[in-house]
Amino acid sequence: MLSFLSNFITLSCGVLLVAVPAVLNIFAYPLSKKLSLLISHYIRTECSRQLFAIFKTYKHFDFLGYTENLDKLPQQFIIVSNHQSLLDIALYMNFFRKVEIRFVAKDNLARHVPLVSEMLRAEEHCMIPRRGKPSVAMETIDTFGKRVMERGQIPVIFPEGTRSKDGNLGTFYTAGFRRLSESAPLPVAVCALDGGYRINNLSTIFQNLHNGYYRVKVVGLFPAPQNKEEQVAILEKGKELIQAQLDEWRK
């Protein structure tokens, strides 16, 4: 009974937290980009923090953002990370609250995803077409890279391209990262995250939320790559660093 009540309270609080700004942004986006940006900023800076606070209060779910290496980060950089859940977006919004981060994501997230879709469109995150010529995807990344450079934003890319269902690392694809690092020639921060795969859908979220965790840590920092060989080497080394951190966390 107590477990059911805790689940009900957590779900209710989460829905209420998400529903109000989500509904407001649905109506604001087509009417006023300025208003939609204000709501999106609130979602990015406040909702992610509040969501994890609700999880902790009612389900003892911990957000563990490790601060080691944060002081070594330059003013602007590219984040390369493994990918486990749609909530990875909220994770990074919470972890990097003091900077403006922008995600490289599939364009299906820009439609019909509460709280997320209008925010991604209003803030001009990089929406990669799922269908169409690869050249269109590369042009989209080019435009995005130039935009984040001009605005001093922090781009986030998931080289796996899709979420891991079991938490194991998948293949790191180089094309998107190489194009981004060419259009936005920035240092590269490699980040490891873990825990999202256990709460990546409604059927598992209440099973694994209690006493669960979501971890994130900067595990490597590289100078801006100068050529294809350096780009590939960063991804290979980055994957090794992420795997080593996952192994350490899961001991």
Image (tube, helix red, strand yellow):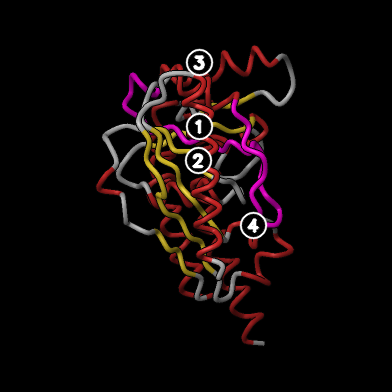
Name the kind of residue labelled 2 in the image: Lys
Residue under label 3, please give it.
142
- Which mark, residue 197? 4
Are circles 1 and 2 on residues that touch, CB within 8 Å? Answer: yes
Tag 2 residue: 237
Cα distance in 3D space between marks 4 and 3: 30 Å
Q: Is residue 130 left or right of residue 117?
A: right
- Residue name at image x 46 percent, y 18 percent: 227
Q: How far apart in space, not on screen, are marks 1 and 2 (Cα)?
A: 6 Å
Whether 55 is drawn above or below 239: the answer is below
Q: Which residues are magenta?
A: 148-174
The total number of labels drawn is: 4
Mark 4 vs 3: CB contact within 8 A: no
Q: Secondary structure at mark 3?
A: helix
Q: Are marks 4 and 1 in contact (CB under 8 Å)?
A: no
Q: Circle 1 is placed at which residue position?
A: 233
Residue type at mark 3 is Asp
Q: Nearer the viewer, mark 2 or mark 3?
A: 2
**Relative to the observer, which residue lies in front, 138 or 69?**
69
